[in-house]
Image (cartoon, grey):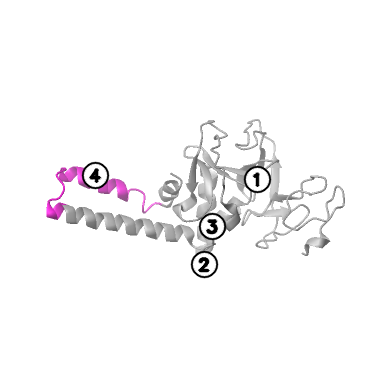
């Protein structure tokens, strides 16, 4: 839809189709409403402008208050499709608890496998590099979260509290979904397995050469630690966010 055909419902001012707020009056124009790609959609649209999926968003009441890590205002509880999320009404960031994010990643990998999607991994956006890095607190435990390049190769840096969940700034969750659908998690998993195999060979060579003085059972224990979780998708996902 051409940008000039969109108008703010509050003041009538023209607005770009990818704008989330009206530049004239500040009214909200778009929300995360796509159950397939979690893209932001112009309010009133019935289908996602990114992937074409039907809009499915429900705001729910909750007695549990969680504040946005950046704006420090109460986040809204929303259900996108069948996924429970929290959304900041001010900065439009998204909070996904650990279980919800794991389900999102697993479902999108299954979709990619069924559809046979083959696409180049999304390139990093030049303008998205944060200049002044600020660590933000977890909405659940209030401890400062770790900043992690999702899957170590997605070029999307998210804020992670390992026990509780992940914070996505505006539009980052959609970019993560694109990364997964392009085979990003599969590529990251293959790379990690290759690294483990390289370490195994190095360990074996070092033991054969007598270069290490540590006991064999200790070295075997180290290798077992490297190998934990490789065959389990859930454990692998957790490792990506550490």
Residue at position x 68%, y 63% in the image: 52
Marks 3 and 2 sit apart, C-alpha to C-alpha, by 16 Å
Secondary element at image label 3: helix
Label 4: few (<14), some (14–19) or many (≥20) C-alpha neighbours in 10 Å: few
Marks 1,3: beta carbons within 8 A: no
Check residue 79 in the rendering and tell me which mark sits there, or answer none: 1
Q: Residue furthest right?
A: 12
- Quarter of the image for residue 176 reads bottom right
- Name the residue: 66% across, 40% down: 88
**Mark closest to the chain's N terminus, 2 or 1:** 1
Q: Which residue is mark 4?
A: 221
Q: Position of residue 51 (x, y in %)?
A: 65, 62
- Which x, y percent locates residue 236? 41, 50
Q: Is residue 223 magenta?
A: yes
Q: What's the mark number on residue 108?
A: 3
Q: Marks 4 and 2, Cα distance to the nearest angstrom?
A: 38 Å
Q: Which residues are magenta?
A: 207-232
Q: Residues within 10 Å of mark 3 (few under 14, many from 20)?
A: many
Quarter-of-image position of residue 15: bottom right
- Residues 120 and 111: in front is 120
């Amino acid at each position: 839809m051409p940008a000039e055909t969109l108008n703010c419902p509050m003041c009538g001012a023209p607005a770009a189709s990818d704008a989330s707020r009206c530049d004239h009056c500040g009214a909200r124009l778009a929300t995360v409403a796509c159950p397939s790609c979690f893209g932001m959609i112009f309010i009133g649209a019935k289908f996602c402008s990114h992937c074409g999926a039907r809009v499915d968003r429900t705001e729910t009441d909750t007695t549990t208050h969680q504040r946005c890590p950046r704006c420090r205002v109460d986040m809204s509880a929303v259900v996108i499709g069948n996924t429970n999320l929290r959304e900041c009404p001010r900065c439009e960031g998204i909070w996904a608890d650990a279980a919800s994010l794991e389900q999102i990643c697993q479902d999108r990998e299954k979709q990619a496998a069924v559809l046979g999607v083959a696409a180049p991994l999304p390139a990093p956006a030049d303008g998205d590099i944060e200049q002044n890095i600020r660590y933000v607190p977890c909405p659940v435990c209030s401890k400062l979260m770790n900043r992690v390049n999702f899957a170590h190769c997605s070029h999307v840096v998210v804020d992670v509290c390992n026990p509780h969940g992940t914070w996505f700034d505006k539009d980052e969750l959609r970019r993560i979904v694109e990364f997964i659908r392009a085979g990003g998690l599969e590529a990251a998993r293959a790379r990690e397995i290759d690294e483990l195999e390289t370490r195994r060979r190095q360990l074996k060579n070092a033991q054969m050469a007598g270069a290490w003085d540590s006991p064999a059972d200790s070295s075997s224990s180290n290798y077992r630690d490297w190998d934990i979780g490789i065959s389990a998708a859930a454990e692998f996902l957790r490792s990506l966010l550490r």
